[in-house]
């Protein structure tokens, strides 16, 4: 039995969801050695989960599960700046809604590459 092909034809590579994401991670690793503090990466977090809407309960029972956004990367630079990055091949309607909620709920603008 063959695994089901990806909906968007992406190919998982080296623990990443796509070749594009793996290539971007390699690029981020190169920036660990940058001389300019604004470009030098000091922390790279992968698959960071943000809660957008908490779970909702009625009479003690879960009526609606929480809604989350999982960012491809959260990066911290040597100058203290932090950035949430999503490697996108295609922007789905769900992603666009979650991007807007990230800005509204957390005040975080997602950098898309």
Image (cartoon, rainbow, N blue to C red):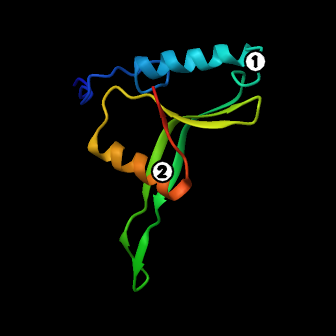
Please state which of the two labelled residues, at mark 2 or mark 1, is closer to the viewer: 1
Residue found at x 66% / y 38%? 82
**Mark 2 packing: few (<14 Cα in 10 Å), some, or many (20+)?**
some
Q: Earlier along the polypeptide chain: callout 2 or callout 1?
A: 1
In x, y percent, where is residue 44?
A: 65, 30
- Graded by Cα atoms within 10 Å as few (under 14), some (14 to 19) or many (20 or more), the crowding at tag 1 reads few
Q: Nearer the viewer, residue 71 or 60?
A: 71
Q: Quadrant of the C terminus?
A: top left
| Disc sitting over residue 36 in the figure | 1
Quadrant of image for the N terminus: top left
Calculate the distance from the C-alpha at mark 2 to the C-alpha at mark 1: 29 Å
- Residue at (44%, 28%) from the top-left corner? 87
Residue carrying label 2: 102
Q: Secondary structure at mark 1?
A: loop
Q: Quadrant of residue 67?
A: bottom left
Seen from the viewer's position, the closer of residues 40 and 60 is 40
Q: Residue 15: x, y in percent?
A: 49, 24
Q: Is residue 105 left or right of residue 6?
A: right
The residue under the point 43% across, 54% down is 101
Return the x and y of residue 105 as percentages of the image width and height.
50, 58
Q: Position of residue 80 (x, y in %)?
A: 75, 36
Between 39 and 1, the one nearer to me in the picture: 39
Per the image, label 2 sits on a secondary structure element best described as helix
Q: Which residue is nearer to you in this view: 12 or 28?
A: 28
């Amino acid at each position: 039995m063959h695994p089901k092909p990806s909906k968007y034809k992406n190919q998982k590579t080296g623990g990443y969801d796509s070749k594009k994401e793996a290539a971007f991670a390699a690029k981020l690793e190169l920036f660990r050695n940058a001389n300019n503090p604004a470009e030098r990466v000091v922390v790279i977090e992968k698959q960071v989960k943000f809660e957008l809407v908490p779970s909702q309960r009625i009479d003690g029972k879960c009526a609606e599960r929480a809604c989350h956004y999982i960012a491809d990367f959260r990066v911290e630079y040597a100058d203290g700046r932090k950035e949430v990055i999503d490697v996108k091949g295609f922007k789905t309607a769900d992603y666009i809604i979650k991007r807007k909620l990230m800005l509204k709920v957390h005040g975080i603008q997602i950098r898309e590459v």
